[in-house]
Amino acid sequence: MAEEAILGYLEKNEQISDSGNFAAERGFDHNDVVNVIKSLHGFRYIDAQDIKRETWVLTGEGKKYAAEGSPEVQLFLAVPAEGSISKDELQKKLDPAVFKIGCSQAGKNKWVEMGKQVSRKVQNVEDKVKDLLLQVQNGHALSKEEISSLKARKLIVPQTWKGYSVRKGPNYAPKRKKAATDLTRENLQKGDWKELEFKEYNFNAKGQPAEGGHLHPLLKVRKQLKDIFLQMGFEEMPTNNFVESSFWNFDALFQPQQHPARDSHDTFFLEEPSTTRELPEDYVERVKRVHESGGYGSRGYGYEWKREEANKNLLRTHTTAVSSRMLKALAEKPFAPKKYFSIDRVFRNEAVDRTHLAEFHQIEGLVCDRGLTLGDLIGVLHDFFSRLGMSKLRFKPAYNPYTEPSMEIFSYHEGFGKWVEVGNSGMFRPEMLLPMGLPEDVHVIAWGLSLER
Ligand code: PHE
């Protein structure tokens, strides 16, 4: 309503010089008019200039007299037109404050004779104070003297009035267009996007905080395990190669070439590229020799080792392939003890069922130092598994081509009420470590388990 009035008025007139008068003339509440002005000004439909005026408003006392008459007039009217009234009688007829103020003002005005008896001195009086108060209430201007007399009696107080003078702005239109916030399919179909005014984007607006999302349960456990290894002082091995040569996955680990795990029924071999590009030749030679005829106190397997078999590329079947590369790298430098771990994917060509996929995450830990024993392995395993909440462990002799002795790890499952296999472990064989060039007294204890199986 006020908006239409303002825009409509400006269509035919230069300006609205005073929003207060504009509101009063049309019976609008000035606050409503001000809100519309602010909004139109924001969209530059109009230009608005502040105007301020000192005005006067009635105090509580002032309002009372404006309604009931001034105390002096109330007192005058309480005095009989003829004869007199005793002061006590008069006091009883009036409010104490009205009586007190009325006496002094009516006395000053010489309207009444004040003594033990009170009587009128004039026939009629005018209530000038009430009239002035009503004028202030209605927004009329008073003379300086009138203002100061009311102010002295604390019947009015000053108030700053704020309003606006208003002219057309750069975006003026007789009717406000609602700015479109989105370009819709309908806009495009109808073609009305050509006429639409679009609301500008607020690039500073904050988006809704994203509160959803969480780690996948598997990644949660992975993080938990990684933290355990780090707390135990282990370094992570670089396991970012899923493709590995048979050499590092099997041969370097003293796994014979006829071993069933090296069959395509158990392992995914690559078709393209089917073979590895290079291997460390002198080390390959030592590995070939230890497979064929042994050495380092071993008799070897006594078969003809084939290079073609070692060259074959595959998807690594265990992260122990990475461990073998890391240990070979360690052997090339002056010896320093190490604790390594990895958690990454391995691939096995197995029947897929409810609990087995053709790939899973393997967790592997190894400690490499002089003079380590099976007791050290058992101790580290107790430490590691108890951090996972498994403190009841049992070990069972097992076989791995690359470890001797080897132990399967069992943990007592309180919920199932039985022993559950949780991992595999062992001490790497001299047939694996010595061809790498590690010192003879350096032993490596290691274990592996699955993250999801
Ligand atoms: N590579 C073994 C497996 O795949 C795990 C293992 C790692 C065993 C290190 C002994 C030592 O189960």
Image: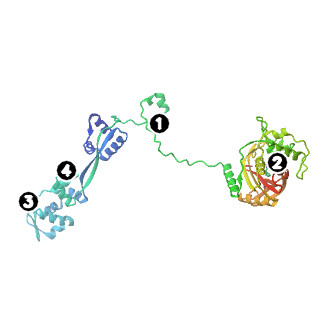
Judge the density around disc 4: few (<14), some (14-19), many (≥20) Cα neighbours within 10 Å.
Answer: few
Of circles 3 and 4, the one toward us is 4
Instruction: Please identify the residue farthest to the front as the structure is shown.
Output: 334
Marked residue nearer the N-terminal end (4 or 2): 4
Q: In the rendered structure, which amino acid carries the disc numbered 2? A: Leu
Q: Nearer the viewer, mark 3 or mark 2?
A: 2
Element at label 4: loop
Q: On screen, 365 above or below 116? A: above
Where residue 434 sits in the image (x, y, percent)? 83, 51
First in sequence: mark 3 vs mark 1: 3
Query: How much space separates mark 3 and mark 2, taking CA atoms?
Result: 131 Å
In the image, residue 119 sits, relative to residue 408, either above or below, namely below
- State the image quarter where residue 304 is shown: top right
Tell me which corner region of the image, top left, top right, bottom left or bottom right, holds residue 198: top left
Tell me the residue at 56%/49% (across/down).
211
Query: What residue type is disc 1 on?
Result: Asp
Separation (CA) of disc 3 from disc 1: 78 Å
| Circle number at residue 234 | none
Indicate which disc, 3 or 4, sits on the residue closer to the N terminus.
3
Q: Label 3, label 4: how many angstroms apart (C-alpha)?
A: 30 Å
Question: Which residue is under mark 3?
Answer: 123
Question: Are circles 1 and 2 on residues that touch, CB within 8 Å?
Answer: no
- Residue receiving disc 1: 182
Classify mark 2: residues with Cα within 10 Å, few (<14), some (14-19) or many (20+): many
The numbered dot on residue 141 is 4
Q: Earlier in the sequence, mark 3 or mark 2?
A: 3
Label 1: element kind:
loop
Residue drawn at x 14%, y 69% is 87
